[in-house]
Image (cartoon, rainbow, N blue to C red):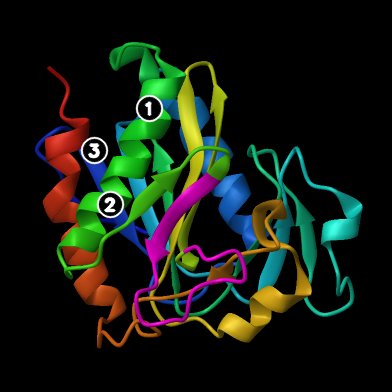
Amino acid sequence: MPDPVEYHQNAVQWHVSAEPVPYDVAVAEMETRVARIARNEAPEAIWLLEHPPLYTAGTSAKPQDLTDPDRFPVYASQRGGQYTYHGPGQRVVYVMLDLGKRGRDVRRFVQQLENWVIATLDQFNVTGEIREGRVGVWVPRDDKPLTATGTKPEDKIAAIGIRLRKWVSFHGISINVEPDLEHFSGIVPCGISDHGVTSLVDLGLPVTMTDLDVALRKTFDQLFAIP
């Protein structure tokens, strides 16, 4: 992992990678850090990065949902969930936090991650929402016509998938800032085929990766501060 760019008030180190990080390299770095956190040898960490174009298969991935297997490298992932895309223009947020210090409530932790994404999007006046049975964060599209069933269309803007080891989390979330949305067409994202994918720039907002990082830091404490 790169050197921390700041030491957060809750003793969480924030790291930012300026260049895209290969997926296998990132996983190896996370696993090393998680082991050190579990042994109380290193502080908790948030790692902000981008990946080269690739697909990952979570523990629930279905082979038929990889519709273009030769397009980009495909990595089996230990996180929960199904197929996801990562690539330039998407902010990946790897979250290495000790749930042993945070109540050991996995469901609550996932809700905190969802609410973190929602609070971050709110900094740009984007309304992110959660849907029962659909993982991730969704944006209602008032600018699109109603679906064939008469419902308002919704697009996915963020994915969430975590794993725990000795009560320390790794993997995390991804938020679409300005990725090539056509790259999502090689998979059925998270196994959901009847909804689209969007990004902050696709929504008409000139948001940069730096803008998003500032918003992520600003909203972190209100959701993850240890009592």
In this view, the mark in front (1 or 2): 2
**Residue on which disc 3 sits:** 12
**Residue on which disc 2 sits:** 118
- Which x, y percent locates residue 77? 71, 46
Q: Are marks 3 and 1 in contact (CB under 8 Å)?
A: no
Residue 63 to residue 110: above or below: below
Q: Amino acid at mark 1?
A: Phe
Dot 3 lies on which element? strand
Is residue 223 visible in this depiction of the protein? yes
- Which residue is found at the position 35% from the left and 84% from the top? 201
Q: Nearer the viewer, residue 106 or 53?
A: 106
- Which x, y percent locates residue 176? 44, 70
- Which x, y percent locates residue 158? 45, 59
Q: Amino acid at mark 3?
A: Val
Location of the C terminus by quadrant is top left
Is residue 98 visible in this depiction of the protein? no
